Amino acid sequence: MPTADVLIYTRTTGYRHDSIPDGAAALTELAEERGWTAEVTEDPGAFTPERLARCAAVALISTTGTVLTPEGRAAFEAYLRGGGALLAVHAAANAEPDWPFYGELLGTRFDGHPEIQPGLVLVDDNDHPATAPLPASWAWTDEWYNFTSDPRASGVRILARADETTYRGGTHGTDHPLVWCREVDRGRFLFTALGHAPETYRDPAFRAHLSGALTWLTA
């Protein structure tokens, strides 16, 4: 892998979550716990081949709308295909709506959510570092994102699902993916739909979830 450095990107051109500073702080702390450095930025000019070459991973924290330039998109795609790593958190599902490569990474698109409410997360894959720290049935409060299609059809590895019987407003039925990952050429991608509220990023289980994601992404 490249030099152990994490680029945390928080730019929005659509809805902006109040929790973005908390998410950036948590990812910075998780990086520093590993002896890595971290840079938090909203500058699309950071996405250059030279800057990305220093990254062990890139994290998108609730980025929304078009947040990259055409040149940044090209550099980012080359970075990922060449062995880079991307952690996409929560509203990052609503980023880069007209970039086909990013849509292929996600395997779906954001399609709204009901009100914030408690429910259950069901862990499908307890062998994966991102979900191994979580209980098989995890009581959680969040915005339970719906998606335009089932990402499973695009070949992703589903790590956790929502139990729609435990909250109102789900649209996927008994198979509602929330956390998934995939390999893309020599790189790795992981998305978690969780992470709406600021306090989320101080929750030990959620921090373990993010830490495990970083472990897998940079293995």
Image (spheres, helix red, strand yellow):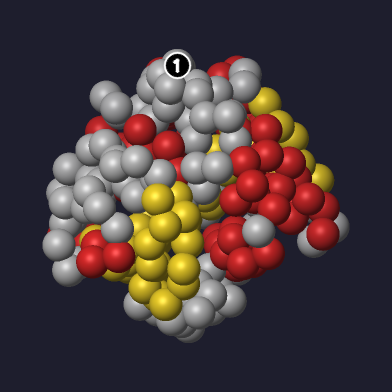
Left or right relative to 212: residue 100: left
Q: Position of residue 169 (x, y in %)?
A: 22, 48
Position of 114 relative to 126 (above/below): above
- Residue 210 figure quarter: bottom right
* Residue 52 percent coordinates (x, y): 62, 37
Answer whether residue 59 is visible to the viewer in this image: yes
Q: Residue 62: horizontal and vertical position, in percent?
A: 49, 35
User: 32 left or right of 154?
Assistant: right
Can residue 54 be seen in the rendering of this structure?
Answer: no
Q: Residue at x 46, y 72 (%)?
A: 138
Residue at point 47%, 61% (across, down): 140
Q: Quadrant of the C terminus?
A: bottom right
Q: What is the x, y in percent for residue 129?
A: 55, 74
- Identified by mark 1, the residue type is Thr
Which residue occupies the foreground of this view, 62 or 108? 62
- Mark 1 Cα-neighbour bin, 10 Å: few <14, some 14–19, many ≥20: few
Quarter holding the N terminus is bottom right
Q: Residue at x 35, y 33 (%)?
A: 94
Rendered position, 73 above or below 168: above
Image quarter for residue 209?
Answer: bottom right
Compared to 57, does 204 lie above or below?
below
The number of discs equals: 1
Determine which residue is flagged by label 1: 13
Find numbered disc 1 in the image and state the secondary structure of the residue it sits on.
loop
Is 72 displayed left or right of 183 in the figure? right
Residue at the spot 17% in from the left edge and 43% down from the top edge: 148
